Image (tube, rainbow, N blue to C red):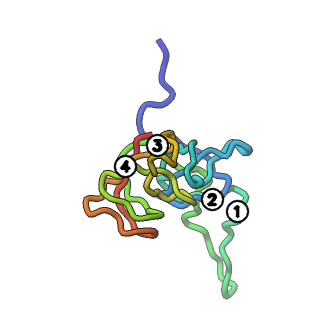
Amino acid sequence: MTTPTFQRGPITREVNVAVTVARLVEPDLATQKVKMAALTSLKVLGIATNQGIPTSTSQDPTLVSGGTSVMLSPIPANIGVASEGVWRMEYGAAASWGDRLKSGANGVVQPWVSGTDSPAAIIGRCEEPAGVAGAGSFGLVKLTL
């Protein structure tokens, strides 16, 4: 009998660039870390469940008037990456309820285009009953990775 290394829930991954919460991420094969997904990525791993910045980024507080300052909640270099569920995400273009979705630039989602985009680019579908108005709007996404 073998023991599974993963059953349910997000997988922890280290970031190589700043990653915004609720954005799609993909692997960065050069660093073996993750980054925000590119437009129509075929390698989307899931959604970032928290914000992350690389370990090389300084988090030293700026002292304004000579007092002692302590960073009480530094931003981690590791993020949770979830590959299923319904999530509130930013859209890069208008979408209707039920539309299939793909990754947009910088990890947002946008409608998948039949006949233009590869079926392998589909990451889920729009679950917002009223649809989503356009770029910069937020709505529900059902991930199906």
State the residue position of label 1: 57
User: Disc 1 residue type?
Assistant: Thr
Q: Answer whether labels 2 and 1 touch (C-beta < 8 Å).
A: yes
Mark 1 vs mark 4, foreground winner is 4
State the residue position of label 4: 125
- Counting residues from the start of the chain, the first of labels 1 and 4 encountered is 1
Dot label at residue 49: none
Q: Where in the figure is residue 91, as x and y percent of width and height?
A: 44, 62
Q: Where in the figure is residue 94, as x and y percent of width and height?
A: 40, 64
* Front-lying residue, 91 or 4: 91
Q: Is residue 72 left or right of residue 144?
A: right
- Counting residues from the start of the chain, the first of labels 2 and 4 encountered is 2
User: Disc 3 residue type?
Assistant: Pro
Local secondary structure at mark 2: loop
- State the separation of the CA atoms marked 2 and 4: 28 Å
- State the separation of the CA atoms marked 1 and 4: 35 Å
- State the separation of the CA atoms marked 3 and 4: 20 Å
- The quadrant holding residue 126 is bottom left
State the residue position of label 2: 53
- State the separation of the CA atoms marked 3 and 2: 18 Å
Q: How many marks?
A: 4
State the residue position of label 3: 10
Mark 3 vs mark 4, foreground winner is 4
**Is the residue marked by circle 1 packed among few (<14), some (14-19), or many (20+) residues within 10 Å?**
few
User: Disc 2 residue type?
Assistant: Ile
- State the separation of the CA atoms marked 2 and 1: 7 Å
* Front-lying residue, 3 or 49: 49
